[in-house]
Amino acid sequence: MGHSAAVWDSRAAIEITKDWNGIEKVVLRNPQGASARVSLHGGQVTSWRNEQGEELLFTSSKAIFKPPKAVRGGIPICFPQFGNCGSLEQHGFARNKIWTIDENSPPLSLKDSQGKSFIDLLFKPSEEDLKCWPHSFEFRLRVSLAADGSLNLISRVRNVNGKPFSFSFAYHTYLSVSDISEVRIEGLETLDYLDNLCGKERFTEQGDAITFESEVDRVYLSAPNVVAVLDHERKRTYVIRKEGLPDVVVWNPWEKKSKAMADFGDDEYKQMLCVDGAAIAKPVTLKPGEEWTGRLELSAVPSTFCSENLDLQGRGF
Ligand code: TA6
């Protein structure tokens, strides 16, 4: 008798549960066994695992799991600002707030839903938020896991009040790597970047792949919509595709800064690299009623599929 095909129970695709401090989280699964977890605390993706159950995102062993502090790892949402300027807290307040599940989110395109396990989250400013950033917005975040295990984040920010506002943004993506000295980034060659270690001075990147021998904290400007992070030891390539996110942040704290962060292990810089799809250099300005969309797709492919096969200058999606 033939084997009955395993019927994928789509109800298993989405599980809403609570983490140990009582905050709701959503688990997304695909039929092949890949998964992603997103917390209603900050709308933060806290886990992305491949079909073999391997964790692809870094989370510090010393992460502080309690609001308002954003968890050190995963993909914190930096909004309405990236960085530490003006009166707002570092990287804005969205990642420190409790979001809600958006039951009737305005529809996205078919390709954003078809064959994907997904959840729609919503963040609207509280009275307290409006005191420190007097702009009324609706921030809708869709997190989805595709049948091929790729992770998609779609942010939609709408200006719902009577005056224009500007913001900067980043998907602050902590990638898990085997050994930072075995990692290189392709796709950012020859670009200009702002170096946070030199007062945000502008430099031009050299002509070959970026490798790591010390602290790096840069915003690469007008980057291609496809960037590859190659982990030689694991023979794994992270492919980062983006749309509406002109810049790419690259950050590794290295040894000295690692030791200075209470929620980060002294040696953990060796196992992580932040490569963030972002809109920083030219903040996004929205007139009343206007909406901005920032898309990110992360996939992890075997490095035998080396970056020569990637259309690094091609369309992001
Ligand atoms: O460029 C990335 C960065 O701004 C670094 O300067 C470092 O501060 C990192 O973000 C982490 O910021 P966080 O507020 O999450 O500790």
Image (cartoon, rainbow, N blue to C red):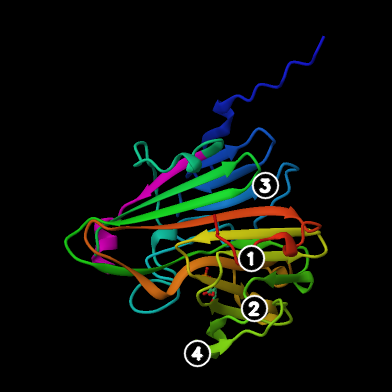
Q: Which mark is residue 312?
A: 1
Callout 2 secondary element? loop
Mark 3 or mark 1, which is nearer to you?
A: 1
Mark 1 or mark 2, which is nearer to you?
A: 1
Q: CA distance from mark 2 to mark 4?
A: 21 Å
Residue 16, given in percent of the width and then of the height, sits at 50, 35
Above or below residue 256? Residue 58 is above
The residue that mark 2 highlights is: 189
The residue that mark 4 highlights is: 199
The residue that mark 3 highlights is: 49
Quadrant of res 139: bottom left
Q: The disc labelled 2 sits on which kind of residue?
A: Glu
Magenta highlight range: 118-134
Left or right: 10, with 231 as reference point? left
Residue 77, given in percent of the width and then of the height, sits at 47, 60
Q: Earlier in the sequence, mark 2 or mark 4?
A: 2
Q: CA distance from mark 3 to mark 1?
A: 24 Å
Q: Nearer the viewer, residue 177 or 93?
A: 177
Q: CA distance from mark 3 to mark 4?
A: 37 Å
Q: Is residue 167 visible?
A: yes
Mark 2 or mark 3, which is nearer to you?
A: 2
Q: Is residue 61 visible?
A: no
* Crowd around label 2: few <14 · some 14–19 · many ≥20 (10 Å): some
Q: CA distance from mark 2 to mark 3?
A: 29 Å
Residue visible at 56% across and 39% down in the picture:
27
